[in-house]
Amino acid sequence: MIEVLGLVKRFGHVEVLSGISLSVEAGEVAAVIGPSGGGKSTFLRCINGLEAFDEGEVRVSGFTLGPRAHDARTLQAVRESVGFVFQQFNLFPHRTALGNCIEAPVHVLGEPRDVAAARAREMLCRVGLAGREDAYPKDLSGGQQQRVAIARALLMRPKAILFDEPTSALDPVMAAEVLGVMTDLAKQGQTMIVVTHSMHFARSVANAVHVFAGGRVVESGPPERVFSDPQHETTRAFLREAGVKGA
Amino acid sequence: MRLLALALLATTAFAGDTWDRAVEKGVLRWGADEEGGGPFVFRDDEDRLQGFEVDLADAIGRYLGIRMEFVQGQWDRLPDMLRADKVDLVLNGYEWTPDRVLAMEATAPYYVYALQLLARKGTLRSWDDLRSGGPRKVGCLAGSAAHEVMLRLAEEGAPLEVVGYDGNTDAMKHVETGNLDATLQDTPIASFYAPHFPGLGPVGDPVAPGYYVMYAREGDHRLVNRLNEALIVLFRNGELERIYGRYGIWTPEQEQLATILETGRFYGFQKAALSEAAARTDATAGEVRAGERRRGWAVVTTYGMQLVRAAGVTVLLSLVSFPLAVATGLLIALGRIYGPRWLRPPLAFYVEFLRGTPLMLQLYFVFFFLPELGVNIPAFGCAILGLAINYSAYESEIYRAGIQAVPKGQMEAALSLGMSRLTALRRIVVPQAARIVVPPVVNDFIALFKDTSVCSVVTIIELTKRFSVLSQSTQATVELMLMTGALYLLMSYPLSIVSRRLERGLEAA
């Protein structure tokens, strides 16, 4: 589904990703954890072409992105098949919740407005926002905004969704709402890569956990093994700091 | 390359003799500035062109069998207009000076002027009062021969403060109000406007006589010969005296013209057409006067329509040039933010260059320099082009700031949903930038609206120029100023209202 091979990314002289290789199967939920500055977000942004990279390859459902300049058409194809949910939500402030949801279906997929709107209402209902269709982003709480953002991504029927620390900007109650929605998605078999600080989510929902540190994947494996029997010293130190018992 | 070829082609096309072209087209364009006012060239209360130079031009045209077309130009720019082929000759109280003769061809003189010192009646007895006694303040038309004389007097130790004025009669008005002690004026102006300033009187006799001549482009000898021929005939048959008489400026000194013209002291030719009938018509002295000096409502009713028509020119200039500036500015902003890397430095230079140099200079460039390369755009086109280019730089900076004020995450979110860059700009970024830029853009439009007044340097008579022309010839400055200000306000205030509506509309969207 998503395959990353030897990904290297430099900002000037600083190498933030030093040869990442990782693959995610269809229906799999991959959690990416690790200390801040380990390159987790940059990695995610390289997958859908928001960042250009210097070496390696990203393969997404039949399309391949190479180093540096990407062909605009390939980029667009990749982005249509992979959704992205941002830490800061990035809803369009000049559109209502419903407007945010139908923007891409209408202007990218070419769906008739009423068809897109019907799907959007249903999707907003699924993420627990029935009745808030006409609210502008500024009138929604952070948790509600993030759920609109998830609905917006889902309406493009993506093969996979990338989550970039989706709950970091939220208080615990709102974070729980969002994680609830994400857990439901995982149960329905949605392919996801989730960069997260929520150890609970990684442990209980993910099928695979990848630990990033210093631009490398220091450890990968099923969550039970990684959490209860970490092999690498960096993983142990990180889990201790994150307050995970048994590390 | 193509432009250069075009330029060369055009240059050769204009290199032909002006006289030949005039004969072929049946038109000779003469340049003057209405703002110079009476008795030279001015508009009367019915908005008709008047002045002894208008009558002189017509008389010359009748003799030559050619239509004389008046072209408005700023007085001190008339030689530039001559060089840029905007006019064929300058006929507007231009003194014969050695400097000017170096750059242009002069005709024989058509008027002998002198400089008359004027002061409030009873304050000064003679020129000696200026040289001794308390410090005094005198004013003259800046850059004129009179200005030179006063500056030299001050240099020689006279206790004088010399002030330069842009208009002919401003200094006279300031003497009347007491801001100045005296003014030195060309005799035609002093005598023509005497009825407007009953409180002023001449001090001593006129001094430092000189000659008004017409100037043609360098090398246009045939045109100059024909003009001289016309002057000789007009003088001999009394037409010149009749014209000057109409404006009350015929003086005994004009007889000098006879000597100069007849002996051909200037150019040594004058055989042509001397046999023309010399039936002298009697001059009706002072038939055309400065008119009564109006005040109050009479000013509004007499000159109101002239100002309103000029306001129409202002509106037209703004409405045509601003959309061009907006469109160009938007393209430049998008090019600088999203365009290819090689395109950004030239665009940045374009913006910095245009913001860093005055609009007036840019207008001069388009109007006076491009013709030298053979690109001759009519005055109105120059004004539009100058305004649009100048304001496109400001517009592009506003849009750039507006687009950059939209958080980066918006573009990223749009791209992540599979939108193309263009769709993302159109649907997500530009609509958000729009509400940010509406107030500064409207602000800019109001600024451009007022900046159209600079277009008078490329001979356009819009509201401000019309005001300044009228105030020179009528001295009703206060009334005209209030009317002009009211017209500007009447036109710009609705824009502010539209802007507020627009802002609210976008807010709700």
Image (cartoon, coloured by chain):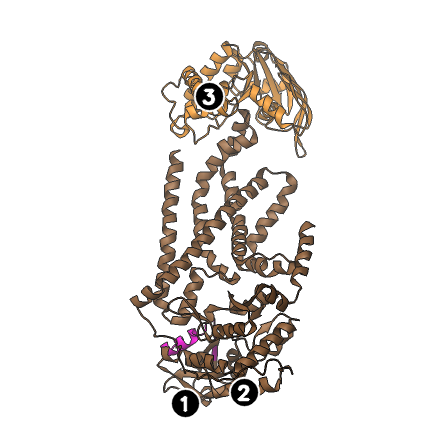
Chain colours: A orange, B brown
Range drawn in magenta = B161-179
Question: Element at badge 3?
Answer: loop
Label 2 resides on the chain identified as B
Residue indicated by mark 1: B125
Q: Residues within 10 Å of mark 1 (few under 14, many from 20)?
A: few
- Against B203, residue B442 (above or below) is above
Whether labels 3 and 2 share one chain: no
How far is the residue under mark 2 from the one under mark 1?
Answer: 29 Å
How far is the residue under mark 3 from the one under mark 2?
Answer: 91 Å
Q: Amino acid at mark 2?
A: Gln
View extreme (left): residue: B297
The percent position of residue B397, horizontal first and vertical second, equals 53, 46
Q: Amino acid at mark 3?
A: Pro
User: Is B100 on the left-hand or right-hand side of B297?
Assistant: right
Q: Is residue A113 visible?
A: yes
Q: Residues within 10 Å of mark 3 (few under 14, many from 20)?
A: few
Does the CB distance between marks 1 and 3 fall below 8 Å? Answer: no
Q: Residues within 10 Å of mark 2 (few under 14, many from 20)?
A: few
Q: Which residue is at the front of the view, B380 or B480?
A: B380
Q: Nearer the viewer, mark 1 or mark 3?
A: 3
